[in-house]
Image (cartoon, rainbow, N blue to C red):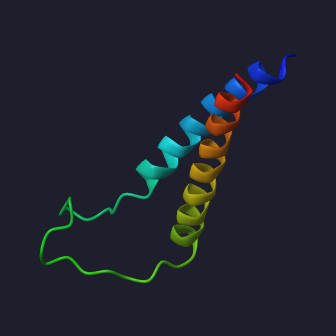
Amino acid sequence: MNILKLIEVATVVFSILTIALIIMNQPQSGDNFGSSDSFTTTRRGMEKNVHNFTVISSVVLLLLVLTSQILK
C-alpha cells in the first residue's frame, strides 16, 4: 500500500474520531453557547480523559494533513 494512501485513510479515521470526541465534549446542561449565568467546573475522571483524547486526536489530525500536503 502506498504511503499517501495510508495517510489518507488515517486522516479519515482521525477526522471521524475527532468529530465524535468533540460531540462527546459538549456540556450536558440545557444552556448552550455559554450563556452569561454559566460557570466552569474542574474536569475530573472520564470527562478529563475525553478532553485530553480530543486534544491529542486534533493534533494528530493536523500532523496527518500537513504531512499529506508536504508529500504531495
Q: In which quarter of the image is residue 7?
A: top right
The C terminus, quarter of image: top right
The residue closer to the viewer here, 25 or 12, is 12
The structure residue drawn at horizontal position 68% and vertical position 29%, both measured from the top left corner, is 68
The structure residue drawn at horizontal position 55% and vertical position 72%, both measured from the top left corner, is 48
Q: Position of residue 32 (x, y in %)?
A: 20, 59
The structure residue drawn at horizontal position 50% and vertical position 44%, both measured from the top left corner, is 20
Q: Horizontal placement of 45 versus 31: left or right?
A: right
Q: Position of residue 9 (x, y in %)?
A: 70, 25
Up-down relation of residue 47 to residue 8 (above or below): below
The structure residue drawn at horizontal position 66% and vertical position 44%, both measured from the top left corner, is 63
The residue closer to the viewer here, 48 or 59, is 59
Up-down relation of residue 57 to residue 19 (above or below): below
Q: Horizontal placement of 29 versus 48: left or right?
A: left
Up-down relation of residue 40 to residue 32 (above or below): below
Q: Quadrant of residue 16?
A: top right
The N terminus, quarter of image: top right
Up-down relation of residue 17 to residue 41 (above or below): above
The residue closer to the viewer here, 34 or 5, is 5
